């Protein structure tokens, strides 16, 4: 098993390779189907295809991978707010907003 973690976090070469995989997936039929509803995974708003970005549910910098089960379409606003939060951290953030 390869050790992807170093003392400074995830190795930059691993992140670069994962970003390349994500870029390749953007041009697939799978991604077209994922984005066909034009809806953000996080806020549920219909924002249009051009306003969707690809987000890693578990961020690359936190050990996530560019796999179909870890990539979701989301609006630019949610993507910018989520940054490198893990799903549980994002849920806590959203719960705090709705109080």
Image (cartoon, helix red, strand yellow):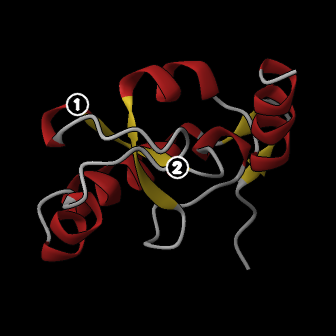
Relative to the observer, which residue lies in front, 68 or 99?
Answer: 99
Q: What is the distance, in whole Å, between disc 1 and disc 2 at their CAs? A: 16 Å
Q: Which residue is mark 1?
A: 51
Task: Please report the residue visible at 52 percent of the width from the left and 73 percent of the height from the top.
Answer: 69
Q: Residues within 10 Å of mark 2 (few under 14, many from 20)?
A: many
Residue visible at 31% across and 41% down? 46
The image quadrant where one finds the N terminus is bottom right
Where the C terminus falls, by quadrant?
top right
Residue 74 in percent (x, y) is at: 41, 41
What residue appears at the point 79 percent right and 30 percent down from the top-left corner?
A: 8
Residue 44 position in % (x across, y down): 47, 45
Q: Is residue 83 visible?
A: no
The furthest residue to the bottom: 1
Taking depth in this image into account, of 71 and 20 the one nearest to the observer is: 71
Q: Nearer the viewer, residue 21 or 12?
A: 21
| Residue count near mark 1 (Cα–Cα under 10 Å), binned few <14, some 14–19, many ≥20 | some
Q: Earlier in the sequence, mark 1 or mark 2?
A: 1
Q: Indicate the secondary structure of the residue bearing disc 1.
A: helix
Residue 56 has which mark?
2
Name the side, left or right, on which 45 lies relative to 92: left
């Amino acid at each position: 098993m390869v050790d992807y973690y170093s003392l400074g976090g995830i190795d930059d070469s691993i992140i670069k390779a994962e970003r390349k995989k994500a870029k390749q997936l953007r041009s697939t039929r799978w991604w077209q189907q994922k984005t066909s509803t034009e809806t953000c995974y996080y806020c549920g708003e219909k924002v249009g295809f051009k306003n969707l970005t690809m987000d890693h549910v578990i961020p690359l910098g936190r050990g996530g991978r560019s796999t179909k089960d870890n990539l979701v379409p989301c609006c630019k606003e949610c993507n910018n707010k989520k940054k490198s939060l893990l799903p549980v951290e994002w849920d806590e953030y959203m719960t705090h907003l709705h109080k």
